[in-house]
């Protein structure tokens, strides 16, 4: 069973249609992987993959800025 | 609530600012401006003020409705870009229309101001009779008060829109509305009258892509109308990519989401009523119509009207 990071990387790559940076701390926005509309898609894809509902109050781009930050957010939800 | 939409009006300043002109000033590509926003040009007023713009749209709306200004019982003026201070511009607008007694309510909101104005008018029409809702914005004054910033200068334009709401039966009955405000993201899109306009585009788009479809579903679900049966969506013209996404989220045909953003850019509160004015001149088919807007605050909402 893939771990959270593997699943997350697969989700990001599917949304961005590009390979995810190897460094989990690298910004997905500054690297050009995501823009504002793809970020919205990513949140929806994360909700589906991890069976969670991200409330609007958590829709802060900083929480989704890198693989590491998204992992941190996901662990805060479990 | 018994209220009807009778007519719309719009006014755009004459000077068109094309992407090529802005691209040269900002050091970016004109093609990038269009691909990221759907905007090809916007209007920037020279001497015209918020009141000038609003008065022109108001006059056009009243003419379309066949209603003299003297018949108005209430005026509501939305503007987020009017110069700060008091009195707010509604009094000057009423004076320009020749009114010296009907009350005026200023709604100092940005993009969602006209939607909130319509909702307020729908509630007050029983008491005040004919209510004129005007939204007027001179966003270029805010942009040009400081060195132009790429992420905001490409988006915004000037203009005004107007709508006449009345308890008298008219072409579109206002069925329902939903309004919301969440202040926790108020710093993400803000202008304090002094520093440059601030906009965290990532955050604003992320919120808008959720909140707009959600509030539209709220009014449609209450009325038990599927999005596929809505004849037109008249939304705040924020960004073409956002309009397209809202249609997709709702499962609505994209051509039913009216768009004029390519020609006018984002005219903040005015955009929804400018869109309504252009749409209404196209002899639209009968059926449910959804108005919706989202903007700084955050404020957002939707209003359902029906011509059947």
Image: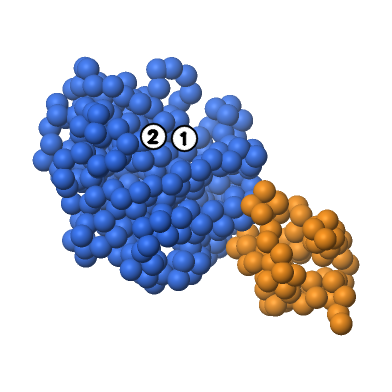
Q: Position of residue A52 (x, y in %)?
A: 71, 64
Q: Residues within 10 Å of mark 1 (few under 14, many from 20)?
A: many
Label 1 to label 2: alpha-carbon separation: 6 Å
Specify the subunit that label 2 lies on: B
Q: Colour of chain A?
A: orange
Q: Which chain did the renderer colour blue?
A: B
Q: Which residue is mark 2?
A: B78
- Mark 1 or 2, nearer chain start: 2
In the rendered image, which quarter is residue B36 located in?
A: bottom right
Q: Is residue A5 left or right of residue A38?
A: right
Measured along the vertical axis of the image, is residue B160 above or below residue B105? below
The residue drawn where x is 25% and y is 42% is B3
Q: Position of residue B115 (x, y in %)?
A: 39, 43
Task: Please count the marks in the image.
Answer: 2
Instruction: Give the position of the C terminus of chain B as an image quadrant.
Output: bottom left
Q: Is residue B81 left or right of residue A6?
A: left
The residue drawn where x is 21% and y is 17% is B100
Measured along the vertical axis of the image, is residue B43 above or below residue B242? above
Is there any visible trace of residue A57 in the rendered image? yes
Residue lying furthest bottom = A1
Depth order, front residue of A45/B34: A45
Q: Which residue is mark 1?
A: B109
The residue drawn where x is 50% and y is 35% is B142
The residue drawn where x is 19% and y is 45% is B6
Q: Position of residue B133 (x, y in %)?
A: 30, 36
Depth order, front residue of A40/B172: B172
């Amino acid at each position: 069973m893939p771990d959270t990071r593997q699943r997350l990387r697969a989700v990001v790559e599917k949304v961005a249609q590009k390979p995810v940076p190897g460094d989990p701390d690298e910004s997905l926005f500054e690297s050009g992987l995501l823009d504002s509309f793809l970020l919205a898609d990513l949140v929806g894809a994360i909700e589906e993959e991890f069976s969670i509902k991200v409330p609007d109050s958590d829709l802060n781009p900083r929480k989704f800025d890198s693989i590491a930050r998204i992992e941190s957010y996901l662990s805060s939800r479990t | 609530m018994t209220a009807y939409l009778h007519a719309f009006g719009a006014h755009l300043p004459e000077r068109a600012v094309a992407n090529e002109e802005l691209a040269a000033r900002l050091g970016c590509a004109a093609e990038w401006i269009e691909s990221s926003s759907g905007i090809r040009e916007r209007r920037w007023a020279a001497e015209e003020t918020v009141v000038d713009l609003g008065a022109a749209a108001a006059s056009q709306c009243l003419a379309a409705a066949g209603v003299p200004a003297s018949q108005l019982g209430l005026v509501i003026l939305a503007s987020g870009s009017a110069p700060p201070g008091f009195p707010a511009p509604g009094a000057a607008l009423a004076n320009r229309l020749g009114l010296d007694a009907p009350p005026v309510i200023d709604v100092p909101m940005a993009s969602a101001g006209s939607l909130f104005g319509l909702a307020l008018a729908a509630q007050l029409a029983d008491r005040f009779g004919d209510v004129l809702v005007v939204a007027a914005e001179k966003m270029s004054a805010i942009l040009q008060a400081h060195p132009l910033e790429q992420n905001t200068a490409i988006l915004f334009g000037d203009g005004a829109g107007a709508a006449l709401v009345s308890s008298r039966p008219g072409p579109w009955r206002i069925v329902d509305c939903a309004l919301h405000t969440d202040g926790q993201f108020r710093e993400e899109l803000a202008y304090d009258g002094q520093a440059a306009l601030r906009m965290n585009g990532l955050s604003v788009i992320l919120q808008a892509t959720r909140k707009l479809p959600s509030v539209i579903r709220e009014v449609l679900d209450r009325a038990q109308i599927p999005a596929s049966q809505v004849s037109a969506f008249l939304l705040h013209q924020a960004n073409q990519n956002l309009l397209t996404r809202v249609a997709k989220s709702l499962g609505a045909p994209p051509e039913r989401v009216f768009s004029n953003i390519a020609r006018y850019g984002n005219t903040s509160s005015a955009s929804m009523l400018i869109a309504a004015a252009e749409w209404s001149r196209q002899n639209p088919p009968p059926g449910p119509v959804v108005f919706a807007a989202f903007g700084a605050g955050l404020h957002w909402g939707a209003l359902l009207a029906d011509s059947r």
